[in-house]
Each structure stands twice: as structure tokens, then as C-alpha cells.
Image: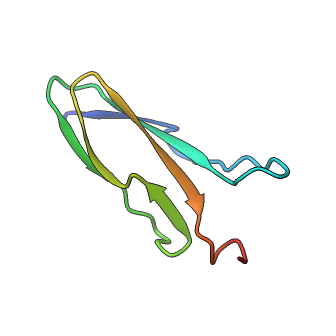
């Protein structure tokens, strides 16, 4: 299978805990193909985590950063 995207981090998304700052983690999607690539990110807990943007198109050679954060209901808000 031809790889179209390089995803960083590859396996685990860690949410660094820093006092008085929002709980966020980034996911970098890098298009390593010669053509535009569409993406859609789905979580195993859609009510627990929000991913923005969750869909999009990345042009050849470009990258995109998606921000992941717990939903308000998961944070006890």
C-alpha cells in the first residue's frame, strides 16, 4: 500500500498537563505524495474528544495541524 500521509505522533497522542492552561494535543498530518490528499479523523470516543479540523484536504508537500482536546462533558464542566 502506498503511504500518502506522515502522521506525527505515530502511535500515542499525549495531553501534557500544565497548570492553568487548556488541555490540548496536536496531530501533524504531512502530505508526502505528489497529489492532494483528503483526510477525516474519527475517534473511538467521539463524545469524549473534539478534533478540529476533523476533515480537510492537504495539498502535495504541505502539512496540517489538527488540535485534539477533551470535550466539555469530559472535563466535568
Q: Which image quadrant for residue 5?
A: top left
Q: Residue at the location (70% across, 71% down)?
A: 75
Exactly how many numbered labels are in the figure?
0
Extreme residue in the right direction: 19
Nearer to us in this view, 74 or 8? 74
Q: Which image quadrant for residue 3?
A: top left
Nearer to us in this view, 14 or 3? 14
Q: Residue at the location (36% across, 30% down)?
A: 63
Residue 16 screen position, x and y as percent: 73, 46
Task: Indicate the quadrant containing the C terminus: top left, top right, bottom left or bottom right.
Answer: bottom right
Nearer to us in this view, 37 or 53? 53
Q: Is 44 drawn above or below residue 24 in the view shown?
A: below
Residue 67 screen position, x and y as percent: 51, 48
Q: Residue at the location (20% across, 38% down)?
A: 37
Residue 69 screen position, x and y as percent: 59, 58
Task: Indicate the quadrant containing the N terminus: top left, top right, bottom left or bottom right.
Answer: top left
Q: Residue at the location (37% across, 55% down)?
A: 54
Image coloring type:
rainbow
Q: Is 17 drawn above or below residue 29 in the view shown?
A: below
Residue 62 screen position, x and y as percent: 31, 25
Q: Is residue 39 left or right of residue 18?
A: left
Q: Is residue 33 left or right of residue 52?
A: left
Q: Which image quadrant for residue 65?
A: top left
Amino acid at each position: 500500500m502506498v503511504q500518502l500521509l506522515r502522521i506525527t505522533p505515530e502511535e500515542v497522542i499525549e495531553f501534557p498537563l500544565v497548570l492553568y492552561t487548556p488541555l490540548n494535543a496536536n496531530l501533524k498530518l504531512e502530505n508526502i505524495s505528489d497529489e492532494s490528499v483528503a483526510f477525516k479523523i474519527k475517534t473511538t470516543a467521539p463524545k469524549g474528544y473534539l478534533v478540529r479540523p476533523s476533515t480537510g484536504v492537504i495539498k502535495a508537500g504541505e502539512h496540517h495541524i489538527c488540535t485534539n482536546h477533551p470535550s466539555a462533558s469530559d472535563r466535568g464542566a
